Image (cartoon, grey):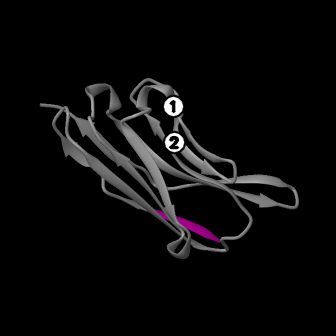
Amino acid sequence: QVQLVESGGGLVQPGGSLRLSCAASGSIFSINAMGWYRQAPGKQREMVAAITADGKNYEDSVKGRFTISRDNAKNTVYLQMNSLKSEDTAVYYCNLKLVRPYGLVDYWGQGTQVTVSS
């Protein structure tokens, strides 16, 4: 069993910053990727940032503003979000991809609301 617990969302003014955290526990092995997705009302869920063995990937609109990092010892992934814009408003979900004999398996956190508004 794998659990992902997120924290750090909230309300922030445009131009402000927030830091999201996601702690993974359980049968954590053979990690393919850890990252963050978001879903705004009426829109599809999209990848925001992810860390794989090959490096870090970012969605174009957050490049230069968001930074993803990972603490391997704590099985925790962070998303530092700076210069936030109203269009960053969404529910942010932590994602963990594990390699299993039958393929990649996705695990999701419960989601944390990020609202950027004055």
Point 27% across, 29% down: residue: 85
Query: Which of 117 and 78 lies nearest the eye of the viewer?
Result: 78
Does the segment drawn in magenta span residue 9? Answer: no
Residue 56 lies left or right of residue 79; in this view the side is right
Query: Which of 100 and 68 lies nearest the eye of the viewer?
Result: 68
Residue 47 x, y percent position in the rendering: 54, 36
User: Could you tell me the amino acid type at mark 2?
Assistant: Ala
Residue 26 x, y percent position in the rendering: 61, 75
Q: Quadrant of residue 40 in the image?
A: top left
State whether the magenta stretch is mostly helix, strand or loop: strand
Q: CA distance from mark 1 to mark 2?
A: 6 Å
Residue 31 x, y percent position in the rendering: 69, 61
Q: Quadrant of residue 61 in the image?
A: top left
Q: For the magenta stretch, what is the residue range?
A: 1-5
Helix, strand, or loop for circle 1? loop
Q: Are marks 1 and 2 in contact (CB under 8 Å)?
A: yes
| Crowding near the residue tagged with mark 2, few <14, some 14–19, many ≥20 C-alpha atoms within 10 Å | many
- Which residue position holds label 1? 59
Residue 48 lies left or right of residue 41; in this view the side is right
User: Could you tell me the amino acid type at mark 1?
Assistant: Glu
- Which residue position holds label 2? 49
Point 50% across, 74% down: residue: 74
Point 32% across, 45% down: residue: 113
